[in-house]
Amino acid sequence: MASFSYSPLLKLTYANDVMKDQLEEIWQNGLKIQDDRKNNIQSYPKWKSIKATVTHDPNNFGKAYLVQRIEFSI
């Protein structure tokens, strides 16, 4: 199972393919915003807020969180 590292201290793994796709969408949106800002293009996040329900990843306890659910607010 792959994971998404948002910082050296925060690693997210996913419970299923839907969570994988949603995490990928969040990741790609963040990369686009970073790229736009490097090119002096003003851009904003796609969502007003993102709420995730996570548990400790039993396969990486203490090192990663397992994303169970994601809610987007526009």
Image (cartoon, grey):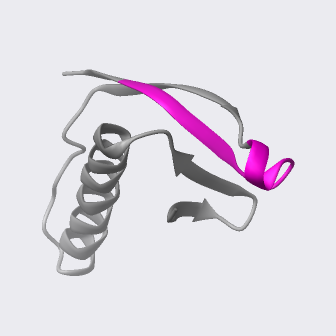
| Horizontal side, residue 61 vs residue 33: left or right | right
For image coordinates 56% across by 60% down, the residue present is 6
Q: Quadrant of residue 27?
A: bottom left
For image coordinates 29% across by 38% down, the residue present is 18
Q: Position of residue 69 (x, y in %)?
A: 44, 24
The quadrant the C terminus occupies is: top left
Q: Position of residue 72 (x, y in %)?
A: 29, 24
For image coordinates 61% across by 40% down, the residue present is 66
Per the image, is 8 magenta?
no
Q: How many marks?
A: 0
Q: Nearer the viewer, residue 67 or 37?
A: 67
Q: Which residues are magenta?
A: 58-70
| Horizontal side, residue 10 vs residue 40: left or right | right
| Horizontal side, residue 48 vs residue 46: left or right | right
Per the image, is 69 magenta?
yes
Q: Position of residue 46 (x, y in %)?
A: 18, 40
Residue sitting at the far bottom: 39
Q: Position of residue 13 (x, y in %)?
A: 56, 51
The answer to whether 59 is drawn above or below residue 65 in the figure is below
The answer to whether 68 is drawn above or below residue 62 in the figure is above
Q: Quadrant of residue 11?
A: bottom right
